[in-house]
Amino acid sequence: MAHVLDTLEALLPIQGNESGKDTHSSKCSVTVTKPNPYTFDLGNLLINDPNPLPPSPSQAHLSAAARDCAQALINQLLTTCPITSSSDGLLMTLPPSTTPLPREKPLPTEKEPTKWEKFAAKKGIEDKKKEGKSVFDEETGNWVPKWG
């Protein structure tokens, strides 16, 4: 667990005091307040931040905005989604997604009928229905062979 926290602190540096040492009070707050509220799609784990960024944001500003969005998403998940305990651990049930995602590939096009299909449609020829070798006998309530 300490390794994960060290990695997170390396990715999102916490501003310390003048001596360079981090103190508990210098860590970021878990509450996030912005002028424009976020919109959430918890089914897709999506957050939309309508707050504009400056024209040429610094890396620290981008990191702070990303941290605020991640914290707001986690706060929303923990307050709205039910958490259950099982033998596998804690499980969080996500609501259905509200944002439709685009398809990776376009819808398939309608196939052109073959020459035989065109001829069969013109003459009114239909496919043979396979009748099968068994019929249902209502007296016994079983399937029995048609003959034999």
Image: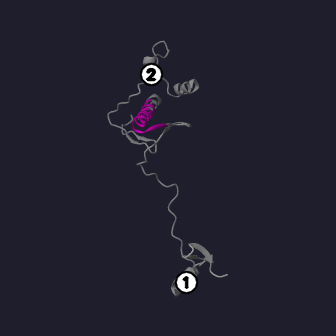
- Which residue is situated farthest in the right direction here? 148
Quarter holding residue 139: bottom right
The magenta stretch spans residue 67: yes
- Which residue is situated farthest in the top direction here? 19
For disc 1, the marked residue is 120
Residue type at mark 2? Lys
For disc 2, the marked residue is 27
Q: Secondary structure at mark 2?
A: loop
The image quadrant where one finds the N terminus is top right
Report the span colored magenta.
Answer: 64-84
113 above or below 5?
below
Identity of the residue drawn at 50% across and 38% down: 91
**Residue 73 image offset from top left, x and y in percent:** 43, 36
Mark 2 Cα-neighbour bin, 10 Å: few <14, some 14–19, many ≥20: few
Quarter holding residue 57: top left
**Residue 142 image offset from top left, x and y in percent:** 59, 72
32 above or below 27?
below
Q: CA distance from mark 2 to mark 1?
A: 76 Å
